[in-house]
Amino acid sequence: MRSLFFILLALLPMQIFAQACIVETQSAQVKVKVCQQNRTIPEHLFRNGFCKPQLAGQKTEVTFVDRCPTGAFGVCRNSQSSGVPYQQDIYYYGVEDDTRFLKPACERQNKGVWMAQ
């Protein structure tokens, strides 16, 4: 009985942070779609900070979901923003050729692990 309690306790954080947001932006030439899946960010900070991009001159639409949808060409696992201890997974959709820019940024700037899908 005690081991069942610890197993359930271990699963609890996954349920607390089961949230994601799909961010779609569009400028005159470029349309971008990413999904940020929360790992350790407090819910209010994730919803009101991480999922509210401020991109000048671009139309931005944010949709909240439980999990990021399938179909991404790559994922930056355990991504961290500079100076912030929180982690999220970032799913990239669209142009797979962008991997040449996204993979190094994931690994160097965001201290994440790039995974091709």
Image (cartoon, rainbow, N blue to C red):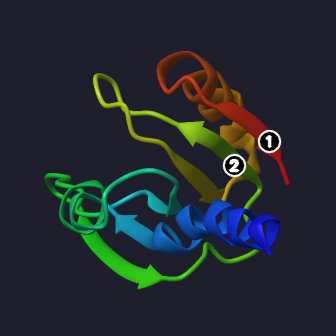
Name the foreground residue: 43 vs 77: 43
Amino acid identity at mark 2: Val
Amino acid identity at mark 1: Met
Quadrant of the image containing the C terminus: bottom right
Residue 48 percent across, percent down from the top left: 18, 65
Tally of marks: 2
Give the mark, 2 or 1, whose residue is nearer the N terminus: 2
In space, the residues marked 2 and 1 are separated at their CA atoms by 5 Å
Q: Is residue 87 above or below residue 44?
A: above
Name the foreground residue: 106 vs 89: 89
- Of all residues, the one furthest to the front in this rendering is 1
Name the foreground residue: 50 vs 60: 50
Whether residue 63 is visible, yes or no, is yes
Report crowding for label 2: few under 14, some 14 to 19, many 20 or more residues within 10 A (C-alpha). Answer: many
Asked whether the beta carbons under mark 2 and mark 1 sit within 8 Å of each other, the answer is yes
Task: Name the residue rendered at 54%, 82% in the picture.
Answer: 66
Residue identifier under label 1: 115
Report crowding for label 1: few under 14, some 14 to 19, many 20 or more residues within 10 A (C-alpha). Answer: few
Name the foreground residue: 108 vs 83: 83
Quadrant of the image containing the N terminus: bottom right
Task: Name the residue rendered at 54%, 62% in the picture.
Answer: 13
Residue 40 percent across, percent down from the top left: 45, 50
In the image, 111: left or right of 60?
Answer: right
Residue 103 percent across, percent down from the top left: 68, 30
Task: Name the residue rendered at 56%, 16% in the picture.
Answer: 108
Residue identifier under label 2: 75
